Image: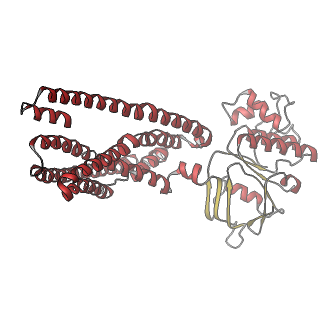
Amino acid sequence: MAASAWLITSASFHPPLSTLAVGITIVRAAGLFRAVFRYAERYLTHTVIFAKLTQIRLCLYEIALTKFPLKSGATAEAELLHDLTVSSEERKNFFPRVVQPILSATIITIIVTVYLFETINLMALILPLSMILTAVISYTFIQKLKINDTDYREMLLDFYEGRDEIFIANSTEIVIKKLNKAAQNLRQNEQIRRNKIADTDRTCSFINAAAFVFILVELTTMVDIINLAVWIFILLLVFEMFTALPNAIRTFVNLKFKIENAELNPQNEILNKSSINNYSLRIENLTFGYNSKMKVIDNLNLEIAHGDRISIVGESGSGKTTFLYLLLNLWAPDFGKISINGTIAASTTNNYIFSTSIRENFLLMHSNITQEEIFKALKICQLENFDIDEYIGENGAKLSGGERCRLQTALALAANSEILILDEPTAGLDKKTAQNLIFEIINDSKKNNHTLIIVTHDFYIAQMMNKIYKLHGGSLERQN
């Protein structure tokens, strides 16, 4: 553009043909270099960087499919999908929409300021000052205009997850009115934000226009008309780059805000469960008693990590079964909180067995189970030689005590849950059979990285696990 300005202005003074020829060559060369630069820039941003980002995103998907708790429900899956798509797209645009405009404007401003300084001395500093003011104003105002839609999204999620209860309570109309009001407030805040952004852009444009005029006035007294035309085109190019700065800074601040919000928001369930707090079960200040004077569980705290294999031992009457029922939410605690991260399955000594066949018991509990999955669970529990279609009697009356216990364990294993809780799984078994059973269950939990909790009175079986806790006096004491 500057070369074109020089050629057009010089031609008006009828220079020699040789000078015009040189000027035309310069203009063509400048156009050629500009085209090469543009294509190189697009190759770098669209071909190289975006290709690498696509590879990273695919790797992220693959990791998420194996690491994230996708079985935690449709809501959690939707939040994960949102994070993997929307957030990754925002990060992908970070270079072309943030880094490139700011970096290009900075480099060009430094170069032009150096050349201007030779002509107009300290007045040349108006150019970088204008850029700095544009950046500072944009950053300052956008910090005050952040809109957090987390509360509204939480309301939508609560409505989705509790829609059946809301319908039963005949409160649908009330809840929808609240949602509509929240949505209207969000729209109004967004419109206010847009109006203030427009005001900010106009302020920045006024500052840049004033700087352009000041520099131009100073140049008119220092250069001839040909060089003045060249400088006009150069300054127009620089200030055109300045107009992209507010949007680049807004994109940067918005992305930074979303990252910080995701890291600090305690209600971000997926991030908390899968990345920051890698736990399967968390028990906080758990207290329970059958009456106000006798506390079976007293202010108990425990965190069990993903993949842990723990055993809980204790004397008869110490509260092992009570603790188990509290974990399974069969009884409500008097005080405290139990947080469960993942799907859970359990086998207790009071589990009921249907008076049909082994196959029907599996199908009644796991409707989509295949025959291969049935035999896999039975094999782990050393029941693979049983006729799975034979009638087993009322509550498994035709089975021995050990066989009935192993069938209960097999039914729980077939759920393939992330957390498996077994209450006295070796009851009625001889020592060798008991050891083989626990050995197979441990191997299966290791293979699937599942959490295994066994409540037992057999200390030898307990030692096969990697952590042992003794329930005593209403609290758990680590034994190893």
Taking the image as shown, residue 121 lies to the left or right of residue 449, namely left
Quarter of the picture containing the N terminus is top left
Q: Is residue 335 above or below residue 282?
A: below
Please tell me which residue is depicted at 86% across the width and 52% down the height of the picture: 461
Where residue 346 sits: x, y (%)? 72, 47
Where residue 171 sits: x, y (%)? 41, 49
Taking the image as shown, residue 146 lies to the left or right of residue 464, namely left
| Closer to us: 265 or 419 | 265
| Closer to us: 279 or 177 | 279
Q: How is the image coloured?
A: secondary structure
Q: How many marks?
A: 0
Please tell me which residue is depicted at 81% across the width and 29% down the height of the picture: 388
Q: Is residue 449 above or below residue 117?
A: above
Q: Is residue 310 visible?
A: yes
| Closer to us: 111 or 470 | 111
Q: Is residue 462 above or below residue 172?
A: below
Q: Is residue 378 above or below residue 268?
A: above
Where residue 170 sits: x, y (%)? 42, 47
Q: Is residue 356 visible?
A: no
Please tell me which residue is depicted at 87% across the width and 57% down the height of the picture: 459
Where residue 399 sits: x, y (%)? 87, 38
Quarter of the picture containing the C terminus is bottom right
State the residue lying farthest toward the bottom. Answer: 293
